[in-house]
Amino acid sequence: MSEFTVSSTVFAEFWTFASADLYELITEVLFYGILLVLVAFAVTLLSRKRQAVGGSVLGAATGVMLIFATAQLLARFVATFEAFRVFSLAVQGQRAPESDIARRAMSKYIDVNFAEDVLLVTNNLFTDSLLIYRCFLIWGRNKYIIIGPGLLLLLSAALSYVAAVQGDYPTAGGPTVDLRIGFALSVFTNLLLVGLTAGRIWYTRRRAHGFLEKSVAARYNTAIMMVLESGGILCAWVVAYVVVRSISPPTVWRVFRGGMAQMLNIAPTLIVVRVGLGHTIQETTGTWTANGSSVESLTSKPESLRSTQV
């Protein structure tokens, strides 16, 4: 039976390193389970509404988000395995850079973490692009309204990619980008999109208030709540992650990091589920009538009163 002698300081250092990865993995597995339930629910509901407007687009988007979520979870499993491998080698007295095997294990761990970071940024780029497209539709396909959010999204993605490279492969004396800047821009982009989308729906409902049946007005209210709900959940989690990362040890903030990888996909999937349940406003439905007159004839811009899928 092999026996190893290692100082308590070294043991504590590497155990903290490995356990932080384990906590992140546990959180990510839990959130991935929630996502799987939502995806299964969404697919079931959408399959019953194959002829619904945008149903195929929503189904495809859900599939892509599930792929991103699965890829990140697999990367987290590999990273956690390598973290405990580094810990095991350290207990045996093999530490990088002195030990070749420990150096290779740490190098693989860093590579997998980098891949995970790139997947996270790309996942965010995809989901935010969906939000921008939704905003584009709700504003009557007005391309000018999405210029600002689009530029902010590209800037936050670029800064996040650079921060990922510098964080995992730091260069002594080189310029650095604070990781929190990319996250802050991402939160601001989401809040801007939420405001534009929910504001447009509210304005449309307010304009047509006198012509809408109660059931239709209720759908507008539900659509607004859907936008606020999905955007609020994601923004709150990202803000919590940034704050906790700034003031807490890795064993704490890595828990929020694990949840964020899946939360990026959970929030949009919640909307897909609500759409599948019928809590939405269709983009291409006809106009409503009130006292025998159509809404189109009573408004200067009938296009804005056409219902829009959220």
Image (spheres, rainbow, N blue to C red):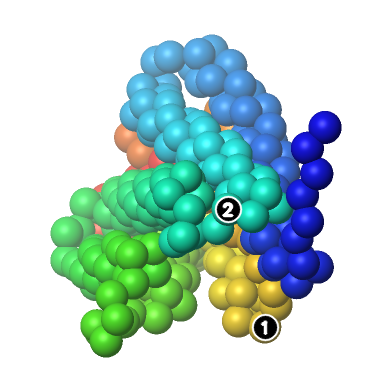
In this rendering, is residue 189 above or below 62? below
**Between disc 1 and disc 2, whose residue precedes?**
2
Residue plotted at (62% across, 48% down): 89
Asked if marks 1 and 2 touch (Cβ < 8 Å), the reply is: no
Q: Is residue 198 above or below residue 306?
A: below
In the picture, residue 301 is in which quadrant?
bottom left
Amino acid carrying mark 1 in the image:
Ile
The picture places residue 148, in percent across and down from the top left corner, at 24, 72
Element under label 2? loop
Determine if residue 268 is in view: no
Q: Is residue 86 visible?
A: yes
Structural crowding at the residue carrying mark 2, measured as other residues with C-alpha within 10 Å and reported as few (<14), some (14–19) or many (≥20): some
Residue 109 picture location, percent across and down: 47, 49
Q: Residue at x 72, y 44 (%)?
A: 26
Q: Which residue is more in the foreground, 159 or 11? A: 11
Q: Residue at x 69, y 74 (%)?
A: 249
Mark nearest the camera among 1 and 2 is 2
Q: Residue at x 46, y 77 (%)?
A: 180
The amino acid on which the numbered mark 2 sits, given as a three-letter code, is Gln
* Residue receiving disc 2: 94
Could you say where residue 77 lies in the image, as x and y percent from the top left?
58, 37
| Quadrant of image for the N terminus | top right
Q: Secondary structure at mark 1?
A: helix
Neighbourhood count class around disc 1 (C-alpha, 10 Å): few under 14, some 14–19, many 20 upward: few
The mark found on residue 247 in the picture is 1
